[in-house]
């Protein structure tokens, strides 16, 4: 008789955690999907769907929503963290005391730690040591489209080659295609910076600036991503891939992106608080803007778009003034 596969624990029952848990369950894996809100978890158990974040996408039989964390953490080798970046360290603190020695951690969170500006692999190494296999899953992937089974390609990056390959095997199916990478710094910076550019693109479209402006923002946004990312140790080629250009194009051009919709709302005159509240889900680009703009100043890396988004978020200028500030910069060669 075949031995049933060991359960995989997915932490975070928002839209992306749920969609990824469904991919794994569709592949025949037994999946525990943990959410922090007992009422929400109970509703998922009874309706067999996540009506709050991914309505009308029914769970495969092998997906089990759970609300108690500790007894499950101590049983699993494979853990996938999909909480927002502001909750990443808190989740590690929760699970650390009960981790099996062989447990491995992958996350699909995009962003940096608030205040410290640390990349999440640095947070994980800081909290869990550097002997535990770590990986990150990123790329152009709206949760709803994944839940619909529409073809999607992502990158799984890890210094642990075999772990990355085993994660690919767990996730890969006829609609979900992960590629591997060893550039854990580059893919994380791509995922964090594209959210800032999506806010910028949303602002531009909200101001009615047209297709030329959007294309300019994506292209010059990519230049900023490469400049910052390579300075911090990412590989240039990574930013031309799924976790860089791929996710940048996706979120700058499609209204499924919450970051883009957030920027659009700012351009219409909403405050940061109002726009965030209206979206009602995580907008990672806000904290990413604060962290990346601060790091860019600290390391003297030229990031004009990021800086103007920062000025708008800090209420130091209006969206239109930010656009004027970008356009009135001294002309310079496109490639330096
Ligand atoms: N949605 C998408 O298409 C994609 C998202 N991502 C990334 O995935 C991450 C999660 O985003 P997403 O699922 O979309 O977000 P959602 O806004 O859909 O859901 C966020 C989830 O995180 C939970 N949460 C918030 N704070 C905590 C905490 N302190 N401890 C435990 N759980 C918490 C929320 O719980 P509660 O409801 O109780 O507040 C909610 O279930 C982000 O970094 C995002 O950038 C990446 C690729 C695609
Ligand atoms: O990261 C995403 C798709 O790859 C989701 O983008 P938003 O967080 O802007 O919705």
Image (cartoon, rainbow, N blue to C red):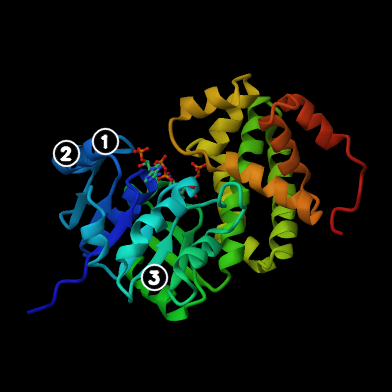
Mark found first going from the N terminus, 1 or 3: 1
Q: Position of residue 111 (x, y in %)?
A: 55, 51
Q: Quadrant of ligand 1?
A: top left
Q: Mark 2 near ligand 1 (CB under 8 Å)?
A: no
Residue sitting at 39 percent across and 48 percent down?
16
Residue sitting at 49 percent across and 46 percent down?
86
Q: Nearer the viewer, residue 68 or 216?
A: 68
Q: Is residue 213 left or right of residue 334?
A: left
Between marks 1 and 3, how big is the CA–CA gap?
A: 28 Å
Quarter of the image with the N terminus in it: bottom left
* Picture quadrant where residue 100 is located: bottom left
Q: Position of residue 296 (x, y in %)?
A: 75, 51
Q: Is residue 26 visible?
A: no
Residue beneath disc 3? 168
Residue beneath disc 2? 47
Between marks 3 and 2, how big is the CA–CA gap?
A: 30 Å
> Do tag 1 and tag 2 residues touch (Cβ < 8 Å)?
yes
Q: Residues within 10 Å of mark 3 (few under 14, many from 20)?
A: many
* Picture quadrant where residue 280 is located: top left
Q: What is the secondary structure assignment of the residue under circle 3?
A: helix
């Amino acid at each position: 008789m075949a031995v049933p596969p060991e359960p995989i624990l997915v932490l975070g029952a928002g839209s992306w955690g749920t969609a990824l848990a469904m991919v794994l369950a569709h592949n025949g894996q037994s999946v525990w999907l943990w959410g922090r809100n007992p009422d929400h978890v109970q509703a998922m158990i009874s309706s067999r769907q996540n009506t709050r974040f991914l309505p009308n996408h029914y769970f495969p039989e092998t997906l089990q929503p759970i609300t108690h964390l500790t007894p499950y953490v101590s049983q699993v080798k494979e853990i996938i963290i999909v909480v927002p970046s502001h909750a990443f360290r808190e989740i590690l603190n929760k699970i650390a005391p009960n981790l099996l020695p062989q447990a491995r951690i992958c996350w699909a969170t995009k962003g940096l730690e608030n205040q410290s500006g640390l990349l999440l692999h640095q947070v994980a190494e800081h909290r869990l040591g550097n002997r535990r296999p770590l990986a990150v899953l990123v790329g152009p992937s709206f949760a709803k489209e994944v839940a619909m089974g529409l073809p999607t390609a992502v990158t799984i990056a890890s210094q642990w080659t075999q772990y990355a390959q085993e994660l690919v095997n767990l996730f890969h199916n006829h609609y979900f295609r992960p590629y591997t990478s060893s550039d854990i710094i580059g893919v994380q910076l791509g995922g964090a910076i594209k959210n800032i550019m999506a806010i910028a693109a949303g602002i531009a479209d909200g101001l009615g600036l047209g297709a030329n402006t959007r294309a300019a923002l994506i292209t010059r946004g990519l230049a900023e991503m490469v400049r910052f990312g390579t300075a911090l140790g990412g590989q240039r080629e990574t930013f031309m891939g799924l976790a860089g250009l791929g996710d940048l194009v996706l979120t700058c051009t499609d209204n499924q992106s919450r970051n883009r919709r957030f920027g659009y709302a700012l351009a219409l005159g909403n405050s940061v608080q109002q726009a965030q509240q209206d979206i009602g889900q995580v907008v990672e680009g806000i904290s990413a803007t604060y962290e990346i703009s601060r790091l860019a100043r600290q390391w003297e890396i030229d990031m004009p778009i990021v800086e103007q988004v920062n000025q708008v978020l800090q209420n130091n200028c209006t969206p239109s003034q930010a656009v004027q500030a970008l356009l009135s910069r001294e002309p310079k060669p496109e490639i330096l």
